[in-house]
Amino acid sequence: MLSRRTLSVLQAIRPFSTTAQWRNTSSHLSDGEQTIHDKLIAQFAPSHLKVLDVSGGCGSFYAITIASESFKGLSTVKQHKLVTEALKQEIEGIHGLQIKTIPH
C-alpha cells in the first residue's frame, strides 16, 4: 500500500488537468483511467471525480476520489462497496484500488 506521502509525490509527477470541480479531463486520462472515469460518471453522476493510475502507468493500481449524492446517509464501508460493485469488471484486472468517497 502506498503511503500518503508517496501518493502525493506521484500525483504531483503524473500530469493531469481538472475542472473547477476537479473532474479529470478526458484528454489526459489513460485508457484504464478513462474506463473507470466513464463508469463512475454513468453510475453516480458525481459532483467531484478524480481517477488516477498511481502504478506508474501500468494500470495495476488506481486512486479514486468521488463525491456524490448517492453516498448520502451511507457508512463509508457501504459507499466503498457501491464503488467496487460498479467497477467489478475492472477490479478483476488490477492489483489495488484506493477509494475516497465524499457524501453530499
Image (cartoon, helix red, strand yellow):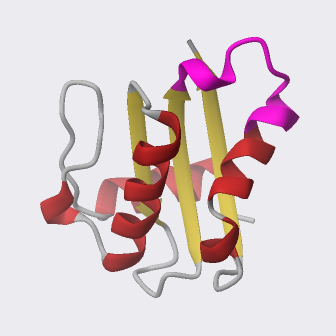
Name the image quarter holding residue 98.
Answer: bottom right
| Residue 20 among magenta residues | no
Boundaries of the magenta span: 68-79
Q: Position of residue 51 (x, y in %)?
A: 43, 54
Residue 3 shows in the view: no
- Between 4 and 53, the one lying in front of the other is 53
How many numbered circles are shown? 0
Q: Quadrant of the C terminus?
A: top right
Please tell me whether residue 40 is drawn above or below residue 77 in the rendered image: below
> At 44% from the left edge and 80% from the top edge, which residue is drawn?
56
Residue 35 shows in the view: yes
Q: Position of residue 13 (x, y in %)?
A: 31, 63
> At 71% from the left edge and 81% from the top edge, which residue is drawn?
92
Please tell me whether residue 52 is drawn above or below residue 82 in the rendered image: below
Q: Position of residue 78 (x, y in %)?
A: 84, 34
Task: Decide if residue 40 is on the left or right side of residue 35.
Answer: right
Task: Decide if residue 62 is on the left or right side of residue 95.
Answer: left
